[in-house]
Image (cartoon, rainbow, N blue to C red):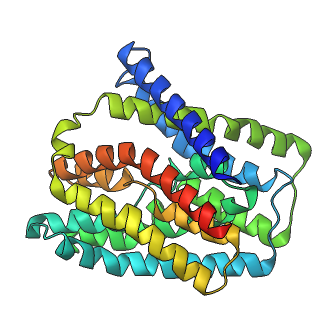
Amino acid sequence: MSTVVIVQQMGVIVILVAIGMFLYHKKIVDNSVSPKLSAIVVDVCNPALIMGSIFSGNFTATHRDLLEAILLGAVFYLFLAGFGFVLPLLLRAKKEERRFYNLMTVYTNVGFIGIPVARAILPDKAILYVIVCNVMYALLFYTHGITVLSHGKEKLKLSNLFSPGTIMAVLSLVICWFDYTPPQIITSSITYIGNATVFLSMALLGVSIARSKIQSGFRQIRIWGYIAVRMVLLPIAMFFVLRAIGCDEITILGFCLMAAMPIGNLPLIQSEKMGEDTTILSGAITVSTIVSMVTITLLMMLFMTLLG
């Protein structure tokens, strides 16, 4: 894929986000409608998009590809789990804020934003790496994430591991492994549902930006430090590491795109449930999401140029 196509596709995403902001300002999608649409995207459309990508006819993955993706995904998230303790120290975050920066480092938006963006700008095979990252994300958040946020006080609920997105992602890997194709009526239904994901998720992102008070977030120097290190330098470093170990172009682009994602919403949701002050998280999520539309575009253009 050329850099021109990447710019065009990211331009489309910006337009869809702008539509969401317009819908919010016109009160077509308000604070009561947005959570319901988000639930539809997360629990129905996103999982269908993952599965639908497998049935597109353009997706091919050998057993070796699957095992390589799982291994790379596991190593990537184990690294992030360790880096999550280091980055807050590098940013000189206050002691009481370090756990939030830890979560921000590990749990980026590889689902709600990562899936539709990957589908828009990368070849179909790249969805394999998106699936793997989403599985690792879910498994790690409800173990490592909960422990970090609660200082070990919150009990692990295994039922949280079995969300629709996680189940569909794991099922997609199983289907890839056994090369199984369901009946046409099933594949068509899943495809139609999944096709709604890109517009709905990006429009809802616009709604989220429109209702956020972003001024205070943009004034936080540590958030900019986070963006520079986690969303720019880390993907660049990952690019050279993956290329050095001989990964193919799609593998490199898939994982680097996932590494460049902005902060995810799950840490914020969990913090609110636990009664924590979410000022840092909400500001960082909004700023990183807005900035990511620029950083992702520039990084993917750079990576495509370097790959020739």
Relative to 76, residue 49 above or below: above
Residue at the image point whose x is 66% and y is 79% from the top: 247
Residue at the image point whose x is 90% and y is 48% from the top: 183
Residue at the image point whose x is 46% and y is 27% from the top: 18
The C terminus: image quadrant: bottom right
Relative to 218, residue 229 above or below: below
Residue at the image point whose x is 19% and y is 49% from the top: 278
The N terminus: image quadrant: bottom right
Front-most of 297 and 179? 297
Q: Judge whether residue 162 can be spotted in this image.
A: no
Residue 72's spot in the image, x, y percent? Answer: 58, 79
In the rendered view, does 209 fall on the left or right side of 16? left
Which of the 4 image quarters holds residue 303?
Answer: bottom right
In the rendered view, does 262 fall on the left or right side of 174? left
Residue 292's spot in the image, x, y percent? Answer: 42, 49
Front-most of 249 and 191? 249
Residue 223's spot in the image, x, y percent? Answer: 23, 56
